[in-house]
Image (spheres, coloured by chain):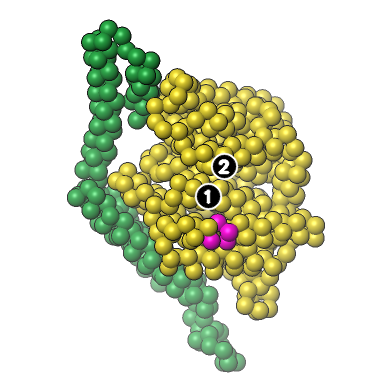
Amino acid sequence: MIVLPLGIVWFAAVGLAVLDGRRRAVGVAATIALAAGLAATGWLGVVVLRDGPLETVAGGWPAGVGIALRADALGVLFAGLSLGVLLVALVYELLGGARTRSFPALVLFEAVGLTGLFLTADAFSFYVFFEIAMIAAYVLTGYGERSRQLRAAMIFAVVNLLGSVLFLIAIAALYHVTGSLDMATIASRARIAEANPVMITGAVLFVAFGVKLGLFPFHFWLPAVYTGTRPAVSAILSGALANIGSYGLLRFGAGLFPRELELAAPVLLLLGTASILYGALQAVSRRAPDEVLAYSAIGQVGYVLIALAVGGPVGYAAAILYAVVNAVNKTLLFLAAGLRGWTVGAAFAVGAFSVAGVPPAAGFLGKAALFRTGLAADGTTTEIGLVLLVFLGGALSFVYMFQVYQRRFWAAGDGPPTQPSIATRRALVLALAGLVVALGLWPEPLLAVSARAADALRQGAP
Amino acid sequence: MTLILSLAVAVLFGSGAYLMLKADLIRVVVGMVLISNAANLFIMSAGLTTGAAPIHPLSAEGTVADPLVQAMTLTAIVISFGVSALLLSLVYRVYTSHLSLDLDDLAAAEEREEAAIEQDAADERAAIAERAAADGQATADERRVLAGAANRGGDR
């Protein structure tokens, strides 16, 4: 049953890879496959939330020998989120017509990599799925094949390959320290293993995921890449691919090495704060919408890191919630920034409100959870500092998002100078904005799921 | 043995990192290949055990070598092979569109593109302003284009 979402998308990806993706039928088939994968993930999610985590060992091997797939609330939530983002981006691009024959298949391969990564219980399969997702993303970054996109793809591929190699080294080190690749076994053995090697491995893992996420000291590649790519691809990179980083930090940090995470909390707080302030200040000083959004992405992941550093049930739930809401926001904003017309302006405004954390947009939930996290931190200074930081970050994001809004949708006066965008694309973006508002107005399901996911993390390992 | 292996990993990784910092894209790719091989060697050296070959009817006496390390390294080799091929094809595409493999040339091309876009916007503004001066007053339509051009000039 866990294999179902993975299998549907995987077979479809392999099949469609040999067909011409510019043809309408192929695009429709890819959309149907991705939607089916999403539906299967949703069904899996319902079962997992009702009956608890599911586990299968691939190939019919006895448990402990074969490679295990495992679906718990956290994995299913991220898998559903990523598939949803990919589906929206795919439909968005297909409405204007795919430009290369490989585009639909690449999006499906990306979906395979991400779903597999979120549903595996084995550290090495995690690496393999991670590479599938990354390789698809390298090719997707070059999508459009203009010189800007090629330069972006080159930067993205080289920097992220380095991150992947670091991750591989960390996995090898983990195997050396704990003698296992199964995540649950690693978690239980890491608790009794010698502290130093585990700490160093944890640090390497943190760097690897920091590169994926674009956290402050590892962010240098991010603006060049996000501004160089086409809107649908930026949406995929920031809405789906960046989930690897958040999920990895949660799964490996909070799930496998809670002791080391606690030790590293001051460093994480510092880096998170630096990320938030650096991202927000750079974003305020930029003019081009995609550049502002790229720096905003650096700032937003800082919040996830801070929530993770505070830890505990409140902190983990806030980190998960914020990562989910941020992915949806970024998808909406990158897609809306590529379009013109007043309806798109409204959708962009919803996204902007959401990033700034103004109710009723979904971003308010994330900010509220962070305030709660700030109050849960120990020590009055940290408490006050965190609450002030979240407030300041929110205020700055309000400023930069509305600078973009003003320049993009107001300054051109009535009637934009270029032709208005395709109506169906605008409708899609508007629907996404509706989803953001709906999540903000009816937050209970998302809150409950993220609390469940945080529980799944804290009950020891996957 | 451990010392030799770790020295080899360090030298491979170090030379790879050195090559990656070069301005020539082919060297960057070669550096990447060296670094992935450093990682492969690291996996081998982290889990290397001596013993009988791990083939199914296991010999009863003596230890058996750990097959998992070799399986992992093989997978990693295959992945890094695919990634190197992808990187090389990407470098080739960059070459066909820029006719250069030098990062300084690429940066210069980027600046030229930005400048060209700025110049277009400025030209458009100047042309409209000129015509407006000739006609006495710009039409509403032209004013809108003017505002749009100023906006786009700022964007890019």
Which quadrant holds the N terminus of chain A? bottom right
Mark number, residue B68: none
Residue at the spot x=44%, y=73% of the render? B74
Q: Nearer the viewer, residue A401 or B72?
A: A401
Residue B116: percent from the left, percent from the top? Answer: 25, 32
Q: Residue at x 41, y 70 (%)?
A: B78
Q: Examine the rendering and report whether any part of residue A381 can be seen.
A: no
Q: Position of residue A378 (x, y in %)?
A: 71, 33
Few, some or many residues within 10 Å of mark 2 (<14, 14–19, 20+): many
| Pick the front one: A184 or B101 | B101
Q: Chain of mark 1?
A: A
**Chain in green colour:** B
Q: Which residue is mark 2?
A: A428
State the residue at coordinates (49%, 69%): A15
Q: Which residues are magenta?
A: A29-33
Q: Tell me the number on the disc at residue A91.
A: 1
Q: Which chain is yellow?
A: A
